[in-house]
Image (cartoon, rainbow, N blue to C red):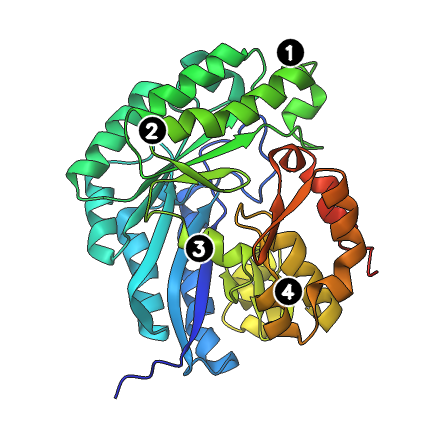
Amino acid sequence: MENNSRLPLELYIHIPFCVKKCAYCDFLSAPADRETREAYVSALLKEIGGLAGEYDLADREVVSVFIGGGTPSLLEGARMREIMDCMKEQFDFASDAEITVEANPGTLDREKLRLYRGAGINRLSLGLQSASNRELRVLGRIHTYEDFLESCRNAREEGFANINVDLISAVPGQTYEDWIRNLRTVAELGPEHISAYSLIIEPGTPFAQMELDLPDEDTEYRMYEDTAAVLREYGYRQYEISNYARVGFTCRHNTGYWKRTEYLGIGLGAASLFEGRRFHNTVDMKEYLTDSGRPGAIRKDMEILTRQDEEEEYMFLGLRMTEGVSESKFEEQFREKMTDVYGAVLRKYEKMGLLQKKGDFWSFTRKGIHVSNGVLADFLQDRG
């Protein structure tokens, strides 16, 4: 008899390799030779194999997998298939599990795409970032827009029916008109999902050391605000601060993260939320390669979440979703009324026109989205 009470589990697999670091990137990734990549995949397989001995996974069902980086598509297709085969040996997958791999144009070919499909990968996230070759050079990308078009065409021909495209706004030298042109160019291709992020200058990146010709604050505001309006014309609904999807194609993995579905992070530096704890793997490659077969030995910064921690996460993660957070689900989960815990902060921002209540849900207004970071931080402080 089928067990319908199994708990959903998400998996994140980190591939920390790229051809070269982009000028804006602060992710845990770096170029590496083939020998290092091979050793890493072997260590990754050991970690996956060791998880069953560390956790009781009998009541868990994997509903999504996200293979991110770095540039996962830098690996040979056969190695990606090994990773997928190993996961399927250790975990029970839902029949409709969403399995995503990030891929950059310039690192994909038909054979890799064919192997991905054969391994069960059913969603492709293409890191385009811009439809302008000038902007791609500014960002330090290794590909051209024409390379992207070839990758996109090949993916469709190999059977991928769920494709995301990443775009970055507020690129140095980019005008408002440039950004809208990028949006329309990509939307007309008809991907099922578009992630549109505003460039953030992170400390320690090459961009942080440069004098950049960035759009002014008003222009950046217009870029963000009009993104939703333009994409709506093409049938995309904004469901999260930076994500837009056609009906039926919201990213299950992303949504699970914002709604605090438990997940295990596998690979160098990968973060987890599991059994009321948050932790991450070591970021030291040597330590990871040596100890990955003993997952408990590579865990760092283990934090047991209190009920207050979980309530705060429910609010500041859930409010990233455009539908917002549910009062009834909060009470069901925590046995407290949301307004008893956060009434003061909710009323404060409702009065300022930054939060709104529609039925059972509290959510950001359009005005509130633009200052969301400051509002969300208040849920970590205000308990009145």
- Mark-to-mark CA distance, 2 and 4: 40 Å
Which residue position holds label 2? Answer: 234
- Name the amino acid, label 3: His
**At numbered mark 1, what does the secondary structure look like: helix, strand or loop?**
loop
In front: mark 3 or mark 2? 2
Q: Which quadrant is the C terminus positioned in? A: bottom right
Which residue position holds label 3? Answer: 253
Residue 350 at what x, y percent from top left?
Answer: 72, 44
The residue positioned 37% from the left and 20% from the top of the image is 184
User: Mark 2 vs mark 4: which is more N-terminal?
Assistant: 2
Is the Cβ of the residue at disc 3 closer than 8 Å to that at disc 1?
no
**In-front residue for pair 82/210:** 210
Residue 289 at what x, y percent from top left?
Answer: 52, 60
Residue 82 at what x, y percent from top left?
Answer: 30, 60
- Name the amino acid, label 4: Phe
Which residue position holds label 4? Answer: 279
Which residue position holds label 1? Answer: 213
